[in-house]
Amino acid sequence: MPAIAEPAIVVRVAAEAFDIAREIAALRTLAGVGAIVTFTGVCRDEGGTLAALELEHYPGMAEAEIRRTAEEAAARWPLAGISVIHRFGRIAVGDDIVLVATASTHREAAFAAASFLMDYLKTRAPFWKKEHPVAASGGWVAPRAEDHAAAARWGKK
């Protein structure tokens, strides 16, 4: 499906918290927007066993790879805009980790693109996660089999 026009793509990787309402407001200003879909990933406590997550990345490389995937989403679906914001550093339980927001004329494209982008972020984005448990030393976390299965449904064009 062709895009509405050249979509606005925002990609940020930052240690600071992001403002979800501000990101949605920015997408609302784009021409042709009739639907905005957002996903916010939150650091969960894993049943009270997790104190924090630590995320590392290669500056520049992570942004470029996320942008490449956002451009792929824009080529697949008619989108007016995409915002992907991913945090790094130590993230406490309950804090936001990632925001994916997609805007389109209709909801189907916005939902599909947001899901596609999150599947990519969970499995192929160049981030490394380390868990910091409440009562023990932590360990690095790899994508789960179900994350890879979710990403595989999109195939490669």
Image (spheres, grey):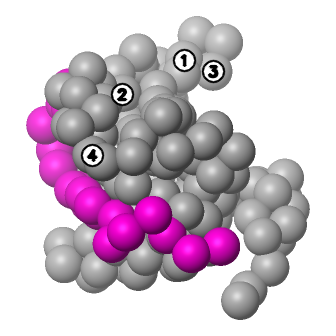
Give the magenta range. Answer: 1-19
Relative placement, left or right, of 45 versus 59 is right
Instruction: Describe the element under mark 3 as helix, strand or loop.
Output: loop
The quarter of the image holding the N terminus is bottom right
List the residue tagged with mark 2.
Answer: 96
- Counting residues from the N terminus, which is met first, the one under dot 2 or under dot 4? 4
Q: Residue furthest top?
A: 48
Q: CA distance from mark 3 to mark 4?
A: 38 Å
Q: Nearer the viewer, residue 18 or 47?
A: 18
Q: CA distance from mark 2 to mark 4?
A: 25 Å
Q: Please say whether residue 11 is one of the residues in the magenta stretch.
A: yes
Q: Is residue 86 visible?
A: no
Q: Quadrant of residue 96?
A: top left
Three-letter code for the amino acid on which mark 4 is drawn: Leu
Q: Are marks 4 and 1 in contact (CB under 8 Å)?
A: no
List the residue tagged with mark 3.
Answer: 46
- Counting residues from the N terminus, which is met first, the one under dot 3 or under dot 2? 3
Q: Nearer the viewer, residue 112 or 33?
A: 33
- Counting residues from the N terminus, which is met first, the one under dot 2 or under dot 1? 1
Rendering coords of residue 52 (x, y %): 39, 29
Q: Residue drawn at (85%, 66%), measured in percent from left and top? A: 153
Q: Quadrant of residue 151?
A: bottom right
Three-letter code for the amino acid on which mark 2 is drawn: Asp
Three-letter code for the amino acid on which mark 1 is drawn: Asp
List the residue tagged with mark 1.
Answer: 45
Q: Is residue 151 visible?
A: yes
Rendering coords of residue 142 (x, y %): 63, 60
Q: CA distance from mark 4 to mark 1?
A: 36 Å
List the residue tagged with mark 4.
Answer: 30
Q: Are marks 3 and 1 in contact (CB under 8 Å)?
A: yes
Q: CA distance from mark 2 to mark 1?
A: 12 Å
Rendering coords of residue 121 (x, y %): 53, 59
